[in-house]
Amino acid sequence: MKDLISLCKRRGLIFQGSEIYGGLANTWDYGPIGVELKKNIKDHWWKSFVQDRADIYGLDSAILLNPRVWEASGHVGCFNDYMMDCRKCKGRFRADKLIEESMIAADQAAEVGGWSKEQMEGYIAEQGLKCPECGAQDFTELRQFNLMFQTHQGVVADSTTAIYLRPETAQGIFLNFRNIMNTLRPRLPFGVGQIGKAFRNEITPGNFIFRTREFEQMEMEYFCAPEESLQHYDAWRRFCMDWLADIGLKAENLRMRDHSEDELSHYSKATSDIEYKFPFGWGELWGIAHRGDYDLTQHQTFSGQDMHYQDPQSNQKFVPHVIEPSLGVDRLLLAVLADAYDEEEVNGETRSVLRLHPRIAPIKVAVLPLSKKLNDKGLAVYQQLQKHLVCDFDTTQSIGKRYRRQDEIGTPLCVTIDFETLEDGAVTIRERDSMAQTRVSLSELLHALQAKLAI
Ligand code: ATP
């Protein structure tokens, strides 16, 4: 993980947030290379979950919502974690995470989701859990902590103006269910997808971009008839797993974990997490939940607006059930980086390389003239290719250093321009993974690159 974080900084993928002021803990900025990678991941999700699907619509709803939304959704009452402090070192911890870590260490199934305060306190006392920071066995009582960020709208900061930064993008979709029904008149089953920022005042953020207080989510709510919902739930679980394999994540680093009855939210019929084997251990990457008719029914009750769907064939009226695949952009980006990161010996030197799938690689092709005298020719090639593929034009330092730089940001192909190019009109394509080189004429270059990238 240390090597990955240092590569991210060195190569302009991810910087510490507010760095010149000494940073702000657990905030990160995506640099010029990171932002391209992030955009490619989001674009690919959007294409697969919205554009390629006749049954799914896109949405971009507001971050600030009427505060009643969060009462209806249960976030004001239930979006709490239990925290405890170490009396000795003053470290603060999330009780469920500490217990899960201890269970994983003891090779037990770590499922703490539905545990009560008493159950957690019982486990901590029985197992004699120690503070992970200082080793003391002296924790305060467990206290509930609401994860929503509260702020105020308008100039007067009183309780009537209190609003929240959304802790998930999903509620904006439920709020627009009627708008979409009334304007586009879709038939069930149909889905609505959205990508956007979410905020959670996490007690223990950390592990680089795995858990932060400000992050992005890609969520889709799939509305369906109650009797078909379990079938759709199964289909979405499979679809999501296949999608991760399709962007290049290795099968051995992925697993599906079904929540036990204890762990399920009171309204959920079934939930699975796709977990990824991060450098620090297995962690949730993608939650796929069967939310029943909970959200729409709650909004119907709180807003007084009708959330029923009338089946055009049977004329039956019912509140649709919902399947929700919910994925964190930043968490996926970390999984993608960890999965792609590789080190190998080449001619007695260590080469770091990001073996990213060409579809999500930030830069597809780097154009590298071998000498300053070839820069004009190189620039002309770059300008031609840039119209079709995201390219880089790099003229500084030795060719070996330039290859390493491109390897480290996962550029699948480099094109080198040499003195022979001026005579035979041909260039060399060098492949990131195999480092194999092939000579191609300029007239066929774009075609050859596109064929190699296969995107
Ligand atoms: P966790 O148990 O890790 O706190 P969660 O079960 O609360 O996660 P969900 O509410 O299901 O997470 O959110 C859906 C997805 O959003 C997660 O699978 C994850 O990819 C992402 N996500 C949630 N919280 C964070 C966070 N603090 N930082 C980054 N991504 C997050």
Image: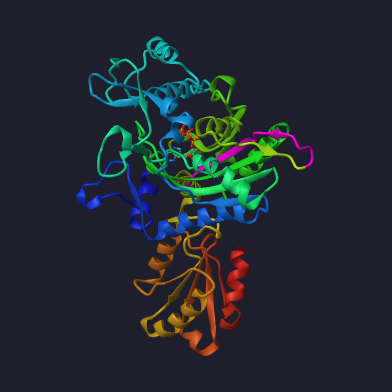
Quarter of the image holding residue 215?
top left
- Return the residue nearer the eye: 429 or 239: 239
Q: In which quarter of the image is the C terminus?
A: bottom right
> Which residue corresponds to the image point at 51% horizontal and 53% vertical from the top-left?
42
Q: Magenta stretch containing residue 314, yes or no?
A: yes
Residue 392 spot, x, y in % from top left: 43, 70
- Name above or below for residue 369 compared with residue 288: below
Q: Which of 314 and 232 is in front in this view?
A: 314
Q: In this view, does 279 lie to the left or right of 29?
A: right
- Residue 276 is situated, as x and y percent measured from the top left of the image, at 52, 38
Can residue 333 be seen here?
no
Task: Relative to 298, say whether 253 is above or below.
Answer: below
Residue 307, given in percent of the width and then of the height, sits at 60, 37
* Snapshot colouring: rainbow
Q: Residue at x 73, y 40 (%)?
A: 311
Q: Nearer the viewer, residue 167 or 85?
A: 167
- Residue 71: say if magenta: no
- Residue visible at 42% across and 78% down? 370
Q: In which quarter of the image is the N terminus?
A: top left
- Quadrant housing residue 97: top left
Question: Where residue 188 appears, x then y in whole percent?
Answer: 70, 43
Q: Is residue 285 left or right of residue 57?
A: left
**In terms of depth relative to the viewer, which is nearer, 220 or 5?**
220
What span is colored magenta in the figure? 313-329
How many circles with numbers are drawn on the protein?
A: 0
